[in-house]
Image: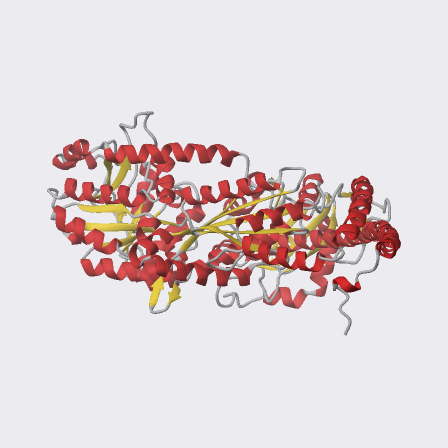
């Protein structure tokens, strides 16, 4: 076998020069032809793809708007309160207007709501917050009539909700219709009486603008006829052409070709020189040199522990994505593990290394096609991706990462509870360099840290200043804990019947800060992200137990942050404080938010069981601000539910809020839980909550949070809380 790379087989200088010269000319010509042909093909295909994508986007935008109206009909028609109001012998038009008619002034979800009878005549209507006096449905055009005629039996039975397009006298509208029926069970109407809810949302310039922005459609507008080949017909439910949606093509291929033409010329010239030089000087030893370089590069770009690409590899990947062109979008997802330091401290660095390897393996599987995952060092990971839909793919990856950390991690015989703070930055080369994009993702990640961890933050310009502010507050918190700058204030909790103070809620304050007082909302989130919440939380619990210990008939409620609740030693720390202060466990109530309970159900359930074993009670705080459900209330068996002021504070002005509060109280009573209403600010709210059967009340109507001295005065003079009238209370049966 002839060894072509042997020195003995290398041609003479003249022969080698001729061979290299001819090969070089042929290669250069091929490169030039290939580059320009590829550019032309890419330009043409890009334009075709964009044209097709835009047409699909327009159709999708229309269907999305129809689906939005369909969803609005479901949300409002399938409603027990609506059934009671519209099927009553005399419809409550005031309720109908306040619930549906006023919506046009409040939001832009719809502009018309109407109630039709079994003959599909208008019984009541509100159009753009004005009464609608017409009885027949000619106003709604043939589209609605076609929907009714095609689905009359299904509408009468309430099996389905229907939506489509129509031409009303006010213009082109997305319209939906559905039977008003209860959420569960069948409609308790045994004659032919039927009530249908119709919702309209008329097409206007703002809707077109919003659809264009959402679906990335340039110059979206509506005309009676097509203006160019870039038009699609808009058809009603009666299959009549209502008009045409038109848009302006972006022609990305042409833009890319213009932008790249100069670079291609320079590439051709550079390639010609490099090819000639490369062939002349490297033909003999190229394969050996390339092999050695590849091995060295792989070693330099790989993390030794996780075997993922390292920080350097990620930066190079960002540069590669940037080199694709200024219009090419790219995204960076920065991930920092929450609680990793605790794992190293408790179990040792060997377990920490094993955890990093395990997490790296899981994250690698979740990386979207075309993306690159890297370990940045310590407990930090990053993923970069570029191209079409890069931002959406990055957001989806971040969401799947958070979902993974919601469950405990099994590591041998150990079960570890971890979290992740994630930042995302997206943009193109026009907006920022690769290094700047990476810095933005890092800043966004730190914002997730300071706002509660276990979340995703997308970068915006305000976050840069927020990061600097966070570092300053972290320093001040450390100094404040060391120099006794913090206080604990107390807000009374009163019995709903007697209006006597039966407990207090402990709230941290920072009155002696050197740079001026800072509100809790401004520093608690920063304390959580920096790990200072453990020391701050222990201070509040210890101080509150010490202050309230002499007041033997008052119960103490203390808020527990998600970071504290996540600590596997938290229950032991609570027991230690109780023992140190001699505070009875039966008088202590710990308040947790529903957000953390839902995100970490297993850890939350374990902690609640352990706390109850100590003798303390556990309350669900801020009820009504999240995704509460009866099932999860039963699962976690709370002792008390605290209805958030955003809901309880509306019982005097919002009938729906009042109904929700009453229903919550009935459910809680059936589950053996007491209910505390927060944010009581006036006598009318007090009366409503008393009549609803609320057990305890809290709010500025009784007292704002006060220092210990003021609390002691109120405790010694209980008549201070008896100024409000004691009303007769008629509790509803649960």
Q: Residue furthest top?
A: 515
- Quadrant including the N terminus: bottom right
Q: Is residue 594 visible?
A: no
Residue 191 lies in quadrant: bottom right
- Residue found at x 69% / y 41%: 209
Scheme of image coloration: secondary structure
Q: Residue furthest front?
A: 8
Instruction: Give residue 590's position: percent from left, percent from top.
Output: 26, 50
The image shows residue 636, relative to residue 208, as above or below, that is below
- Quadrant including the C terminus: bottom left
Instruction: Give residue 193's position: percent from left, percent from top.
Output: 57, 62
- Residue found at x 71% / y 43%: 327
Q: Is residue 188 visible?
A: yes
Q: How many marks?
A: 0
Instruction: Give residue 143's position: percent from left, percent from top.
Output: 74, 55
Depth check, front residue: 310 or 86: 310
The image shows residue 291, relative to residue 715, as above or below, that is below
Say left or right for 178 vs 647. right
Instruction: Give residue 376's position: percent from left, percent from top.
Output: 49, 50
Depth check, front residue: 26 or 332: 26
Depth check, front residue: 666 or 373: 373
The image shows residue 417, relative to residue 330, as above or below, that is below
Depth check, front residue: 677 or 151: 677
């Amino acid at each position: 076998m002839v060894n072509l790379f042997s020195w003995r087989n290398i041609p003479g200088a003249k022969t080698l020069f001729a061979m290299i010269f001819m090969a070089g000319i042929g290669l250069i010509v091929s490169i030039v032809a290939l580059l320009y042909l590829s550019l032309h093909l890419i330009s043409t295909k890009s334009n075709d793809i964009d044209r097709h994508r835009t047409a699909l986007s327009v159709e999708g935008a229309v269907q999305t708007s129809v689906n939005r109206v369909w969803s609005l009909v479901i949300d409002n028609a399938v409603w027990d309160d609506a059934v009671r109001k519209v099927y009553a012998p005399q419809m409550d038009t005031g309720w109908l207007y306040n619930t549906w008619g006023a919506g046009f002034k409040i939001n832009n979800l719809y502009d018309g709501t109407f109630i039709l009878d079994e003959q599909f005549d208008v019984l009541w209507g509100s159009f753009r917050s004005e009464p609608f006096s017409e009885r027949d449905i000619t106003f709604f055009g043939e589209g609605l009539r076609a929907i009714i005629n095609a689905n009359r039996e299904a509408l009468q039975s309430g099996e389905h909700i229907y939506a489509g397009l129509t031409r009303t006298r006010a213009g082109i509208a997305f319209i939906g219709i559905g039977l008003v029926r209860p959420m569960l069970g069948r409609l308790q109407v045994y004659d032919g009486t039927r009530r249908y809810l119709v919702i309209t949302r008329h097409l206007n310039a703002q809707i077109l603008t919003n659809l264009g922005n959402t679906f990335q459609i340039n110059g979206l507008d509506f005309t009676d006829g097509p203006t160019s080949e870039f038009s699609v017909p808009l058809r009603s439910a009666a299959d009549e052409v209502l008009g045409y949606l038109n848009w302006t093509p972006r022609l990305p291929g042409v833009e890319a070709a213009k932008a790249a033409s100069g670079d291609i010329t320079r590439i051709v010239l550079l390639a010609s020189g490099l090819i000639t030089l490369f062939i002349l000087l490297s033909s003999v030893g190229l394969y050996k040199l390339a092999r050695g370089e590849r091995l060295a590069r792989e070693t330099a770009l790989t993390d030794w522990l996780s075997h993922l690409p390292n920080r350097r590899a990620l930066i190079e990947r960002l540069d590669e994505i940037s080199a694709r062109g200024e219009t090419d979008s790219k995204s960076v997802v920065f991930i920092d593990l929450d609680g990793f330091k605790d794992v190293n401290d408790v179990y040792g660095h060997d377990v920490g290394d094993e955890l990093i390897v395990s997490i790296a393996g899981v994250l690698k599987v979740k990386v979207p096609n075309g993306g690159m995952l890297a370990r940045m060092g310590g407990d930090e990971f990053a993923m970069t991706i570029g191209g079409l839909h890069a931002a959406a793919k990055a957001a989806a990856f971040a969401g799947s990462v958070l979902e993974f950390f919601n469950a405990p991690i099994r590591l041998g015989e150990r079960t570890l509870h971890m979290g992740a703070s994630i930042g995302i930055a997206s943009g193109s080369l026009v907006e920022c360099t690769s290094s700047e994009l990476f810095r933005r993702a890092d800043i966004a990640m730190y914002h997730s840290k300071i706002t509660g961890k276990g979340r995703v933050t997308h970068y915006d310009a305000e976050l840069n200043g927020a990061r600097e502010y966070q570092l300053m507050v972290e320093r001040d918190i450390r100094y404040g804990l060391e120099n006794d700058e913090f206080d604990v204030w107390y807000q009374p909790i009163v019995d709903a019947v007697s209006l006597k103070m039966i407990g207090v809620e402990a709230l941290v304050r920072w009155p002696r800060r050197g740079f001026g007082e800072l509100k809790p909302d401004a520093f608690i989130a920063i304390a959580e992200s920096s790990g200072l919440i453990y020391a701050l939380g222990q201070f509040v619990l210890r101080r509150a137990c010490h202050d309230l210990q002499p007041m033997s008939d008052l119960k103490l409620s203390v808020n527990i942050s998600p970071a504290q609740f996540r600590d596997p030693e938290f229950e032991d720390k609570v027991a230690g404080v109780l023992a140190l202060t001699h505070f009875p466990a039966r008088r202590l109530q710990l308040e947790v938010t529903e957000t953390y309970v839902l995100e970490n159900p297993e850890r939350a359930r374990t902690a609640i069981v352990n706390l109850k074993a100590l003798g303390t009670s556990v309350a669900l705080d801020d009820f009504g601000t999240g995704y509460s459900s009866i099932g999860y209330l039963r699962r976690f068996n709370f002792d008390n539910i605290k209805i958030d002021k955003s809901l309880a504070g509306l019982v005097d002005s919002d009938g729906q809020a009042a109904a929700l509060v009453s229903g919550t109280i009935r459910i809680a009573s059936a589950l053996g839980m007491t209910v505390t209403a927060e944010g009581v600010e006036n006598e009318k709210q007090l009366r409503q909550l008393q009549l609803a059967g609320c057990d305890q009340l809290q709010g500025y109507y009784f007292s704002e949070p006060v220092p210990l001295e003021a609390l002691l005065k109120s405790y010694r003079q209980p008549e201070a809380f008896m100024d409000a009238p004691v009303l007769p209370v008629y509790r509803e049966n649960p």
